[in-house]
Amino acid sequence: MISGLYRGQDGDSQVELRVDVDGNRPTGRVSGDLFTTGGATTSFAGSFVVAAPTVVPEGGRTTVEGQGVFTFTVADRRVSVTISDGSAVATVAGRHYPLVYASPYFRSVLLEQDSVAGTVPFVSYDTGRLPGPAGSAPRTLGVAQAYAEAGIEIRAAEPGVVPAGASGADLAWDDAELHHAMTQQFSVFSDAPAWRMWLLVASKHVGGYRGIMFDYNDSCQRQGAAVFYDAISGESPQAQRAQLRTYVHELGHAFNLLHSWQKNLAIPPQPLGPSGGLGDLSWMNYVQNYRPGGEPAYWAAFPFQFTDSELVHLRHGFYRDVAMGANAFGTGAAEIAPFEQPVEDHSGLRLEVRAKDSFGYGEPVVVELKLGHTGEPRTTHNHLHPDTEFTQISITQPSGRTVLYRPMMRHCVDDSPDITLDRHNPAMYRSAYIGHGRDGHYFQQPGQYGVRGQYVAADGSRIVSPVCVVRVRHPITAADEQVAELMLGEEQGKLFSLLGSDSPGLRAGNEALDEVIERHGGHPLAVYARMVKGLNAEREFKSITPGKRLVIRPPRTKESIQQLGAVARAATVDNITLNMVMRHLARAEARQGDLVRAHAVMDAMVTTFEARRINPIVMRRIRRQAELTKEALSAES
């Protein structure tokens, strides 16, 4: 066997070269990364890959060679590696490198794992404890072993435990708290690509998710993930199996692996597997959405490994496309071709993206997604919000460039409750803030935008909406310009995505929103600043200190009532957002001890939507929601 990692140097040029032509699941490739040394520093120079090299064994040596694809311009694309007992040499881009065999693994990554007290980190699972596919040998797999089978070495740092802090505290984490935990952890990371990633084992997520990758558009791409113990805990074989898949899946995102049904959104696009990707037997698929046959069929056939194309990416993807802290998740850029309507559509589903007539310059752009049926009743999953990534949003900007909306945080859902759309329940709705994501602000200039949605249904059908025109008005007054400038900062966009945060890393954004409220409180856009500040004040906020202790800031009830009350009275936000604001306001009133006022807020919510002549079916849901909220607040009080 000659496959593995080799290192060599020719003057000021170093190479890390990967030969993958024999051994476990060989992909038939040679690839490498080049670095330039200068003084006491080493800098990345470029990557290359040979997709189908010739392999010529001769006597006691083997020569592997072919034409390479490089990330930079070269005069000579030939790559040649000659390996014999005790020595090896490579020729790359005209330079000759004596090589030393370094490892049987193609890449090596350091994993730092912290767990909140009360959670039990996953260790391993015996794949023979439950029936599996014929030909897949039973074995004990932990995270390191699963990646080792893919040729990737996972080195574990000393695990840390975060004390839970005050007893009885709410240990459900939201996106803002996870973002803050990430910024605290990454403050000790270098601002450069590195083979290092962090995993937080937390108690639970407010959205009930099993895992999340909460890295995004700053200089620390794809360095962090979290798994939620309450959603995957258990000692049964089924629970242990689910934990293994969740851990490997979330860390797969850190290696820049997309979900199986999203590979066509990569740059360059990758072909989808069977059933639009839902038929992939991969760690990166969702078991409940596997086609055909769903979860039972997935586990009956899954050999506990990555697909061939994922293996190629892990072992031979260009350095900046795989290394943590380098290129953005999914692509190096967000530009895509606009979604196209399918040639034939017999799904019986219809997707609409709706928005108000126009938005002020700097106003957070919120759209409403509506999924309905066109005839006979249809059953599908209820993951309509783009944060769960079964729905994608494309935005065609005034320049004609089309980009993909990419949420700050990727919520991985391993549970897809069915919803039936029929005459009793003709549609489901979601409100989504799409003004800011991992690529920054998407609506940064006045003009006309075209917004289109694509929903991947439970059976793999891809439902594409008509174009929704979004108009952003030009500022008219000096105050319009000043408020827009305060609203369009990068930190402010993150605060709108997170619905507020205490993170010191977003201090400048919070100060800008404070200035909007204090200096421009009468401006129409001030309601959004009040909403973010009020929602953040209404909740507890968890922080992990540099000393690995959990600190919980209690709700600031008076502030939340003041800010959310102003938003409710203005009633200028969209219906779904107003509904959320008024329920949080009622909770704040109850927390302050005024249950009468809390119930009055819910009654006012019903009256407000009745006056707006909401769809009768939706109006019944709102009345029911108000009654359930009052019952819950009474019970809590």
Image: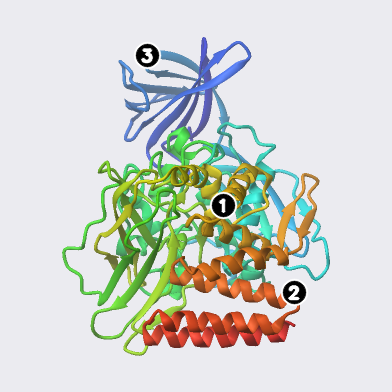
Residue 247 seen in this snapshot: yes
Which residue occupies 67% across, 49% down? 503
Helix, strand, or loop for circle 3?
loop
Badges 2 and 3: C-beta atoms under 8 Å apart?
no
Q: Nearer the viewer, mark 1 or mark 2?
A: 2
Residue 131 seen in this snapshot: no
The Cα–Cα distance between marks 1 and 2, rounded to whole angstroms, is: 25 Å
Helix, strand, or loop for circle 2?
loop
Label 1 Cα neighbours within 10 Å, binned few <14 / some 14-19 / many ≥20:
many
Q: In the image shown, does 419 or 471 lie closer to the viewer?
A: 471
Q: How many marks?
A: 3
Q: Position of residue 94 (x, y in %)?
A: 37, 13
Q: Which quadrant is the C terminus positioned in?
A: bottom right
Q: In the image shown, does 580 or 163 lie closer to the viewer?
A: 580
Q: Nearer the viewer, mark 2 or mark 3?
A: 2
- Residue that mark 2 sits on: 592
Label 2 Cα neighbours within 10 Å, binned few <14 / some 14-19 / many ≥20:
some
The Cα–Cα distance between marks 2 and 3, rounded to whole angstroms, is: 74 Å
In this view, 199 is above or below 96: below
* Tag of residue 345: none
- Residue that mark 1 sits on: 495
Label 3 Cα neighbours within 10 Å, binned few <14 / some 14-19 / many ≥20:
some
Drawn side of residue 606 relative to residue 67, left or right: right
Mark sitting earlier along the chain (2/3): 3
- Residue that mark 3 sits on: 94
Question: Looking at the picture, which amino acid does disc 1 mark?
Answer: Leu
Helix, strand, or loop for circle 1?
helix
